[in-house]
Image: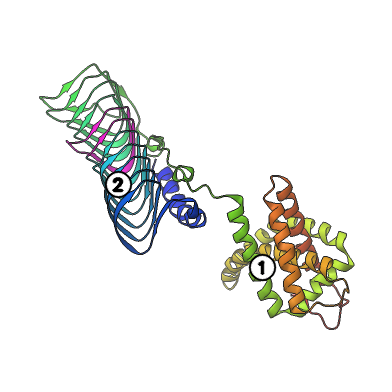
Amino acid sequence: MLKSLKKYMGSLLVAGLLCGAASGAAQAGQYIGGDLNLSLDENDDVLVLAADVVGEGRVGGDLTVFAADVRMNLTVEGEVQIVAADIEIDGAIDGEVGIAGADIRIGADIFNDLDAAGADLTLSGTVAGDAALAGATVIITPDAIVSGRTEIGARELYMEGRLEQGAEIHARDVVISGTIEGPVDIRARDVVIESGAVLTGPVTIRSPKPPSVAEGAQVGDLDYQQYDFDEDSDFDHPNVNIGIDDFGFAPSPWAFGGVFTASAFLLGLLVSLASPKGVAGIASAFRRQPWLSGLLGLVVLAVLPVLTLTLFVLLLATVIGIPLAFLLIFALPIVLFLSYVFGGIVIGDLVMNRSGEPARFGLRAGSMLAALLVIGLLSVIPLLGWLISTIVFCIGLGAWTIALFSRTKPAQNMDAV
């Protein structure tokens, strides 16, 4: 469970911030800044991207928040999705709630399902639907009520509230002093049922040792099963369904394509300014041998991972080679991206530079931009786009390779990059 939690947290925090900024225009109400103190009265969806957020009021649609610290007391008629380090949420929420963070306190009344994952998670509100809770420490306070089915995955669980439709619990240490109505399935290393606890049953406990049941606890039909608790596999629960699509931030291919094309164009400009003769040599190599460029690029692409890994291992064998080995790994993605850029440069040069002479910077930049834009537009087409991008990449890599190893200069003193 903890491995899954780290995966969720990392992917949400990074992808959410990047993709949210790219597609935030689709949101009706946007609040973006450093420290925000919000008094909301919105009839539509609300997006918040900030460092620290304090909020109150009403949201008529969905609420989506990415921040460091969040403290909100709101009435929300739609769904709520929050990713932050520290989260405190109170109020009333009609829709489903998905929360991921480090320290989380949920005191809101939720009239739907709840998915929450954090390091320290405290539930003190009510949940009308099902609840899936995951954390290192999960505390369900005496005021908390879950009307639906409850799934809990934790290292330490302190259940002091009321679960009305049973529970499935996977934890290392479980302490129950509250009420659980309905079937209970517990898989844990240590289970303590304190005085005053009520478990109507049936109760199934799988543990290396029998549960400690205090005098005064009311436990229904108890089925204890000897079980070798495994701290890794037994934390693979619950199924907390929090994903990037849940946050309304499924980025379109146009957003990724636009950023990628703009980055390629800027890098192409820098390379053309830094080494105009080298870029001209690559363009000339492709103009002379276009088919060979594509084929050679495909071959180099096939052997490049093996060659890189071999060089990496050989460099690690010497003390002086260790930093060079890691430099090689970091340089590989730059080389691959440059190959795509060179592909756009040479295709643009072939189409727009009819004279065949080394192009001036203005013509080079214009032809490269036109080529990259066309390639970028075609790249969003399923399957065809992937094929075109691969061809462009192979052309650039092959032309670059030919220019590097060509003994005859294609023009006056044109040194390859």
Amino acid type, callout 2 = Arg
Q: Do callouts 2 and 1 mark residues in contact (Cβ within 8 Å)?
A: no
Amino acid type, callout 1 = Phe
Residue 84 spot, x, y in % from top left: 35, 53
Stretch in magenta: 125-152
In the picture of the structure, the residue carrying the numbered disc 1 is 265
On the question of residue 187 being in view, the answer is yes
* 277 over 209 or under it: above or below: below
| Residue at left offset 49%, top offset 48% | 249
Magenta run includes residue 405: no
Which residue is more in the foreground, 272 or 320?
Answer: 272
Which residue is more in the foreground, 257 or 239?
Answer: 257
In the picture of the structure, the residue carrying the numbered disc 2 is 58
Q: Quadrant of residue 324?
A: bottom right
Residue density around tag 2, few if under 14, some if 14–19, many if 20 or more, within 10 Å = some
The residues tagged by marks 2 and 1 sit, at their Cα atoms, a distance apart of 44 Å
Magenta segment, prevailing SS (helix, strand or loop): strand
Residue 191 spot, x, y in % from top left: 24, 31
Q: Quadrant of the C terminus?
A: bottom right
| Residue at left offset 87%, top offset 71% | 354
